[in-house]
Amino acid sequence: MAKHKMTKQEKECQRRFDTISPLLQENLTEKDRRTKMKEIQENGGPSIRTLKRYYEKYLEGGFYALAPKIHNISGERTISDEILEKAIILRRENPKRSINDIILIMELNGMIERGGIKRSTLQKRMQEKNFSKKEMMQYVMQPGISAHRFQKNHRMDQIQSDFKYAMYLPIGKNGEMIQLYWICWIDDYSRMILDGRFYTSQSFYEVEASLKRVIQNYGIPSTILLDNGAAYIDKRLKIVCNKCGITICHARPYNAKCKGKVERRNSMMNEFLSEAVLDKYTSLEEVNENYKAWERIYHNERHRDYLKYGTPALTFKKDTKPLRFIDDRIIKEAFLTRISRKVNNDATVSIDGTYYEVSNPQLIGLEVEILFDPQKMDKIVVRYPGYDNATASKLKIKANITKTKVTEVEGRSMIKTDRSLMTKGLRNKMQQIDPTFNMEIATKFEKEKTCKKEVKTNLRKVATSFSGKLNSSKQEDKPCQI
């Protein structure tokens, strides 16, 4: 049975009735009633005069007599229908316009005087005409489309994922406060949280790690529904899903309605976060451990009638569709991150600012493919066509220099030659440009030019040597001064 939703007037009547309820007791004298009024006032209630007015109104007209009066705006303060129609046209032209923007446009174009309309008044009138910004935005987000509820027919037909900003913890360097992020994957059919965990960042690596656990524990989903966050549109995530046979679907930007199930779980997480702040956790592991207890309660709570067996855990467990698992080797290969790096002259490569030393120095100078598990970065695999798979480990700088002999590889060693093909090619090009160019004369001229340079250099050396000896002899003949 649908619950009755109280209006603003009814809520105010209820609040006023709760305030004066101690005054309505039977057999109360006027003195006792005044004493109770003083107690209500001292405990933060309204004044005695107001309490008397509420009490008298209730005696005269009952519960609904406590409703506040509705003040009708009249005269110059009322917005005319003509001005309201112009404001509606401006909102229809661009539904994203705010009330302040509409008032500013009307003032600049001489439709109204400056300060002639209050923002709250115009907003209320436009809401009455069903032209609020919220109502008009549906034509911007999905023109001509109305969003309806949907639910997949079986478990793992579709799973959804999202981030949620969480509290801060003093787990940084020197007790620095670090913000946590909650990442979850939820099954569309059963609303069961397949994986939920807190992290210190919201990058692709956290999304990849959580999706890997989902696949290992519950098998391959048919599709995954994601928003357009940086971690979810990463090309590496698409490669992982393609290798596992998963179809990725992205929601329309700024349209969270199609991901309502996971968005609803995010709002429910506020209950846990409000309590987690009081507990004052000091480690990430402690937060995740306590969250798992909350998650188990959620899985066994009865939801609305849209769940076939009442609770998420039971609905997921009793579904007839078999779970689809794949070999662990395929999962491991699919979730290896692949990047390209050039091996430096010291046989190292850099990954996110950390240097790794390659075991095979023959790969120096080559563009190699690096494969690694983001959760296990102790050793990484280095691949290059024609070479056996090498490994790389974190660089450990030693006290003394070490040299590694690089063995020559067939097809890559240097070739000895007694002539320069560059010089030969330039001379051939010169002959094509100038047919009168004589190779022998040019060669002879180069040799004579080289000889002249050598003679000049030798004469310069002799002159320098002679001047040095002459200066030294003059210093020896110089008489001693007393």
Image (cartoon, helix red, strand yellow):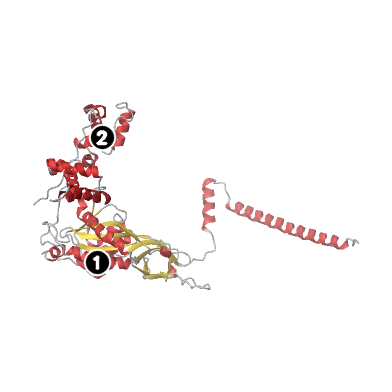
Q: Regarding mark 1 in the picture, which secondary structure is present there?
A: helix
Q: Are marks 2 and 1 in contact (CB under 8 Å)?
A: no
Q: Which corner quadrant of the image does residue 302 belong to? A: bottom left
Quarter of the image where one finds residue 233? bottom left
Instruction: Identify the secondary structure beneath mark 2.
Output: helix
For label 1, the residue is 292
- Residue at the right extreme of this rendering: 482
The x and y percentages for residue 129 are 19, 35
Left or right: residue 265 compared with residue 478: left
Question: In this orientation, which residue lies closer to the viewer: 407 or 454?
Answer: 407
The residue type indicated by label 1 comes to Lys
The mark total stands at: 2
Residue 66 appears in the figure: no
In the picture, measured across the screen, residue 412 lies left or right of residue 194, that is: right
Q: Nearer the viewer, mark 2 or mark 1?
A: 2
- Dot 2 amino acid type: Thr
Query: In this orientation, which residue lies closer to the viewer: 463 or 274?
Result: 274
Q: Position of residue 360 (x, y in %)?
A: 42, 71
Mark identifier at residue 121: 2
Image quarter of the C terminus: bottom right
- Residue visible at 61% across and 52% down in the picture: 441
- Does residue 438 appear in this view? yes
Q: Is residue 20 above or below residue 283?
A: above
Query: Can you say whether 415 is above or below 50 in the image?
Result: below
In x, y percent, where is residue 150?
14, 52
Q: Residue at x 21, y 44 (%)?
A: 51
**Label 1 CA crowd tier, 10 Å (few <14, some 14–19, many 20+):** some
Camera-nearest residue between 430 and 168:
168
Q: Is residue 138 above or below residue 1?
A: above
Question: Which residue, as the protein is rendered here, is positioned at the far left?
Answer: 1
Measure the alpha-carbon separation of dots 2 and 1.
49 Å
Q: Residues within 10 Å of mark 2 (few under 14, many from 20)?
A: some
